[in-house]
Amino acid sequence: MFVDFDLSNYYRLLHPRPVAVITSTCHSGKVNAMACSWFTPVSEDPPTVAVVIDEEAYTSQCIEESKEFVINILPAELINKIWTAGSASGRKVDKISKMNVTLVKCRKLSTYAIGESIGVIESTLIERIYVSGSKIFIGKVVATYVKEGTTGNYGWDLTKVSIPLHGWGKLFYILDNKSRYAYAR
Ligand SMILES: Cc1cc2nc3c(=O)[nH]c(=O)nc-3n(C[C@H](O)[C@H](O)[C@H](O)COP(=O)(O)O)c2cc1C
């Protein structure tokens, strides 16, 4: 039997889900980082991704100004840094310093990736869709790279790295080699 679930919290039924840190650079030259769990692959050829960003977020302004953004996948050990990126605005705070992470020059973009990432997806903005207070930025993926030894045939090698999933608020789940898995028949 179904029971009601608060419609205004519908998105919690779509969590836990992967979480990343988006880096981008504003016209001022400041590099910013923001936590993001509402993102998804969109197409394979050409490769595109979409990130959903609050229109008020500094990141939204930075992507509009620079027309590019980076999806940084941080390992589960760094959830506190992810939380820092998601709990203050870059308008007021230098989050790169606050997170105590290093920046590395992007391969194809003029902005920077986070050196502590295990995976990086660089993309250039090709489209934006506005939906009541949120912007869906769609980017063409122009470069992808990972830390050596972290991936296998199925993507992340969970015997080598732990992947954070965002529950809600400060709750994160950790996918690692102790997590259960199964192959469908
Ligand atoms: C784990 C986590 C995931 C988040 N996911 C999103 C998201 O998908 N979209 C969004 O607009 N904000 C999301 N947020 C909130 C933003 O990260 C937060 O508003 C941040 O302060 C925006 O930073 P900025 O103003 O420097 O861009 C998330 C926060 C956390 C902690």
Image: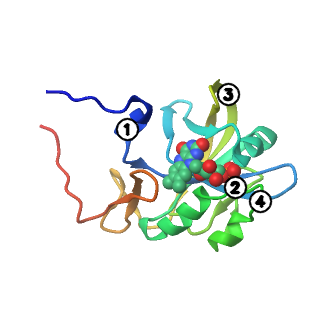
Task: Point out the tag, 4 or 1, that comes first from the N-terminus.
Answer: 1
Residue 91 percent across, percent down from the top left: 77, 55
The outermost residue toward the right is 28
Give the crowd class for mark 4: few <14, some 14-19, many >=20 residues within 10 Å. few
Task: Point out the tag, 4 or 3, that comes first from the N-terminus.
Answer: 4
Instruction: Using the numbered discs, state the Cα–Cα distance from disc 4 to disc 1 in whole angstroms.
Output: 30 Å
- Look at the numbered disc 2 and say if its residue's Cβ is closer than 8 Å to ligand 1: yes
From the viewer's side, name the closer residue of 151 and 4.
Answer: 4
- Secondary structure beneath disc 2? loop
Task: Point out the tag, 1 or 3, that comes first from the N-terminus.
Answer: 1
> Compared with residue 81, is residue 125 higher up or lower down, i.e. above or below?
above
Which residue is depicted at the point 69% across and 30% down?
126
Residue 29 percent across, percent down from the top left: 85, 56
Which numbered disc covers residue 127? 3
From the viewer's side, name the closer residue of 113 and 51.
Answer: 51
Residue 122 percent across, percent down from the top left: 63, 48
Pick the quarter of the image with the N terminus: top left
> Compared with residue 67, is residue 161 higher up or lower down, i.e. above or below?
below
Instruction: Using the numbered discs, state the Cα–Cα distance from disc 2 to disc 1 in whole angstroms.
Output: 25 Å
Which residue is depicted at the point 52% across and 30% down?
45
Instruction: Using the numbered discs, state the Cα–Cα distance from disc 4 to disc 2 in whole angstroms.
Output: 6 Å
Residue at numbered disc 2: 89
- Name which residue type carries label 1: Leu
**Residue 13 in view (yes/no):** yes
Which numbered disc covers residue 14? 1
- Name which residue type carries label 2: Ser
